[in-house]
């Protein structure tokens, strides 16, 4: 359970930090954006993530947590790929906004899913361990983006982040669903 939920948090944070750290440079190099125009990319990413974190959890009242995670990851993956291959600056902006909006629900929902499936006496320890796994994404996201962009270019690096995000609904949310059933009232 912790590895499945932690993998979702790690990938969510990896995408957030990788995109935040490299989006402006991508806009400058790939689209010839001025520094001011390039700064709009990370600003849109952060703004859309803020909006998603404020309002996206309301979707958890209507959708299963694993469904919300899967949809958020697919949306974020599409945004990362769009940001990477966009032929125009406007479409790259749209890609970063989409990436942020989709990624915004991944980490909070992963934490909620793990908490819901963990006995109350073990919940604090589970959340602490989940945090350690997830926050590793903050540290590895920017260097992964840097390594990939150095070897293959920034467009490919953003597409690779999209591919990593696509693993969430394909492999990790099914793993999370199988990891543990919610506790009954007697458990």
Image (tube, rainbow, N blue to C red):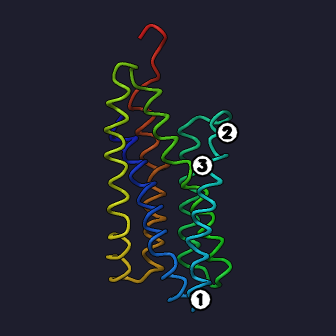
The CA span between labels 3 and 1 is 28 Å
- Given residues 159 and 135, the one toward you in this image is 135
Between disc 3 and disc 1, whose residue precedes? Answer: 1
Residue shown at 61%/76% (left/top)?
A: 40
* Circle 1 crowding by C-alpha within 10 Å: few under 14, some 14–19, many from 20: some
* Circle 2 crowding by C-alpha within 10 Å: few under 14, some 14–19, many from 20: few
Between disc 2 and disc 1, whose residue precedes? Answer: 1
Residue 12: image x %, image y %? 46, 54
Between disc 2 and disc 3, whose residue precedes? Answer: 3
User: In the rendered view of the protein, which quadrant contains the C terminus?
Assistant: top left
Q: Name the mark on residue 33.
A: 1
Left or right of 142, for residue 56: right
Residue 139: image x %, image y %? 33, 61
Which residue is under mark 2?
A: 58
The CA span between labels 2 and 1 is 36 Å
Residue 93: image x %, image y %? 63, 74
Which residue is under mark 3?
A: 53
Q: Are marks 2 and 3 in contact (CB under 8 Å)?
A: no
Residue shown at 63%/66% (left/top)?
A: 97
Question: In the figure, residue 2 lies in which quadrant?
Answer: top left
């Amino acid at each position: 359970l912790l590895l499945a939920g932690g993998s979702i948090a790690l990938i969510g944070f990896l995408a957030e930090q990788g995109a935040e750290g490299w989006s402006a440079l991508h806009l400058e190099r790939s689209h010839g954006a001025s520094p001011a125009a390039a700064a709009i990319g990370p600003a849109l990413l952060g703004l859309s993530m803020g909006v998603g974190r404020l309002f996206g959890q309301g979707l958890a009242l209507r959708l299963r947590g694993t469904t919300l995670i899967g949809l958020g990851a697919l949306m974020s993956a599409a945004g990362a790929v769009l940001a990477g291959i966009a032929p125009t600056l406007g479409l790259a902006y749209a890609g970063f906004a989409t990436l942020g909006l989709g990624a915004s629900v991944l980490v909070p929902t992963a934490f909620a899913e793990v908490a819901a499936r963990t006995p109350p006496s073990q919940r604090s320890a589970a959340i602490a361990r989940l945090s350690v796994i997830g926050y590793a994404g903050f540290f590895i996201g920017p260097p992964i983006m840097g390594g990939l962009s150095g070897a293959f270019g920034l467009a490919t690096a953003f597409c690779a982040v999209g591919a990593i995000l696509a693993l969430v609904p394909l492999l990790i949310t099914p793993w999370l669903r199988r990891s543990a059933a919610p506790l009954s009232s007697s458990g």
